[in-house]
Image: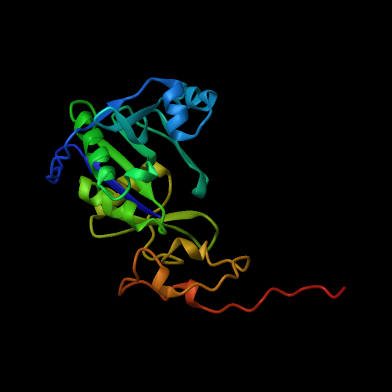
Amino acid sequence: MALATWWRGDSLPPLAPLPGFRVEAACDTHLLAQITRLTPDEVDQRMQAGHQPYLAYVEQEPVGYGWMATQEASIGELGLHVALPETERYLWDFATLAEWQGYGLYPRLLQTILAQQLPTVERVWIIHAPENSPSGAGMTKAGLLPIGQLSFRSDGGVGLAPFEVRERAQAGAALLGIPLIESVLAPCWSCGGATDKHMTIVDADSCWPPLRPTTQRCTCAIKRKPAKTRAA
């Protein structure tokens, strides 16, 4: 998974206006449940835990949503639970409704939320899964800077391999409570830590982020021996 961030003072790239598009902080539990496919109780639990929902509209029609953590954040895939500083936020669980995909709504939703944080927030963080490369492209268009790749370490823990901007990677690693590492155990999430339990052979072309010159060969492309089975 890639970690991206926006810090106060960062520029927001210009995005062409989309007629009728707007973003609002949401509070209608039943509407949110309908759009997000959560139960009303699940929506309430998130909001009570300090998660602020946003809805994107075109004219009067809801077309997408996203959540902003203001107190704490959990990254279930990594087993991480993070207490957020007062001036930092974590964006998560974003989606564009199926009939509205392909119109560039996601970067506009992200950027509108970022713009609304300007007076009080110092840093905003977000991650995205490797198989969802359009999500990564949308983050970049919105103005979020990819700073590193989250990877399993050989001891089973998690580390952050920084990209070019090391200062921000250090801040991200400190927030998540994980170390910086110089190279990833597996350059894509499909490798799942390159443990023996992952036997699926995947074409290296499917790896995300794309293999970098300094990255070791992706273990997805390495054929593993099948697990031994006991005789009946």
At 23% across and 60% down in the image, what residue appears?
A: 164
Q: Nearer the viewer, residue 23 or 68?
A: 23
Q: Is residue 214 above or below residue 78?
A: below
Q: Tell me the quarter of the picture where residue 54 sits.
A: top left
At 32% across and 73% down in the image, what residue appears?
A: 214
Q: Nearer the viewer, residue 82 or 125?
A: 125
At 49% across and 34% down in the image, what residue appears?
A: 37
Left or right: 163 as drawn, with respect to 36: left
Q: Is residue 201 above or below residue 146?
A: below
Q: Position of residue 221 (x, y in %)?
A: 48, 76
Which corner quadrant holds the N terminus?
A: bottom left
Q: Nearer the viewer, residue 113 or 29?
A: 29
Which corner quadrant holds the C terminus?
A: bottom right
Q: How is the image coloured?
A: rainbow
Q: Tell me the quarter of the picture where residue 117 sits.
A: top left
Q: Position of residue 145 (x, y in %)?
A: 24, 50
Q: Is residue 22 above or below residue 204?
A: above
Q: Position of residue 207 (x, y in %)?
A: 41, 67
Q: Is residue 201 above or below residue 177?
A: below
At 36% across and 35% down in the image, what residue appears?
A: 65
Q: Position of residue 159 (x, y in %)?
A: 43, 55
Q: Nearer the viewer, residue 59 or 165?
A: 59
